[in-house]
Amino acid sequence: MPTIPAGLRLYNALINSGNIRYGTLPDGAAAVKLTAKAVAWTYDAWTQIVASVGAGDVLLAAIYTENPSAATDYDVNIGSGAGAAEVPLATVPIFLGVAGVLPFPILIAATTRLAGRTRSASGAANTIDVKVGVITGF
């Protein structure tokens, strides 16, 4: 069976959107706490968000944040891949806890692991809780 280019899949999904569903990962669980390195604007290690996005492809559409430990600016980076081999997919600036919606969704293949990391302006090991918004059914 030939593969369908991602752009065509997205176009078809918008035209035939009867099966589109919006969700969050991790699903039915608390947000994942990310910790910044105690050096300003330096990422700490990746933290797993989900071991698998599920049995079907998803579109990464948003990065939701809550409970920042300090009133400072953050960058949240979402990546995919095996532990210690993550590939960055999206970085969203977070200003005082406001979430970031991606202007264009990113296709994530079925069963892919997602992880996140953060950095902050303060130079302290600040934390922020993260979930990602996904689109399924396309």
Image (tube, rainbow, N blue to C red):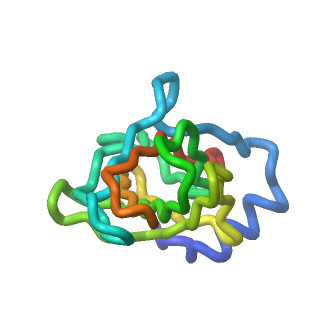
**Residue at point 58% right, 73% down?**
6
- Up-down: is 34 above or below 11? above
Taking the view exactly as shown, the residue that stands out farthest to the left is 84
| Along the line of sight, the residue nearer the viewer: 22 or 88 | 88
Side of 138 relative to 44 (left or right) = right
Residue 121 placement (x, y as % from top left): 45, 66
State the residue lying farthest toward the top: 28
Q: Left of 80 or right of it: where is 45?
A: left
- Residue depicted at 81% across the width and 44% down the height: 18
Q: Nearer the viewer, residue 67 or 62?
A: 67
Total labels drawn: 0
Residue 112 is at least partly visible in this image: no
Q: Where does residue 78 sit, x and y in percent of width and height?
A: 42, 60
Q: Is residue 12 left or right of residue 116?
A: right
Q: Quick one: 137 or 68, which is closer to the camera?
A: 68
Mark yes or no: residue 59 visible. yes
Residue 86 position by quadrant: bottom left
Answer above or below: position of 121 versus 114: below
Percent of width and height locating residue 118: 39, 58
Corner quadrant of residue 36: bottom left
Residue 67 pos. (x, y %): 54, 37
Front position in the image: 3 or 27: 27
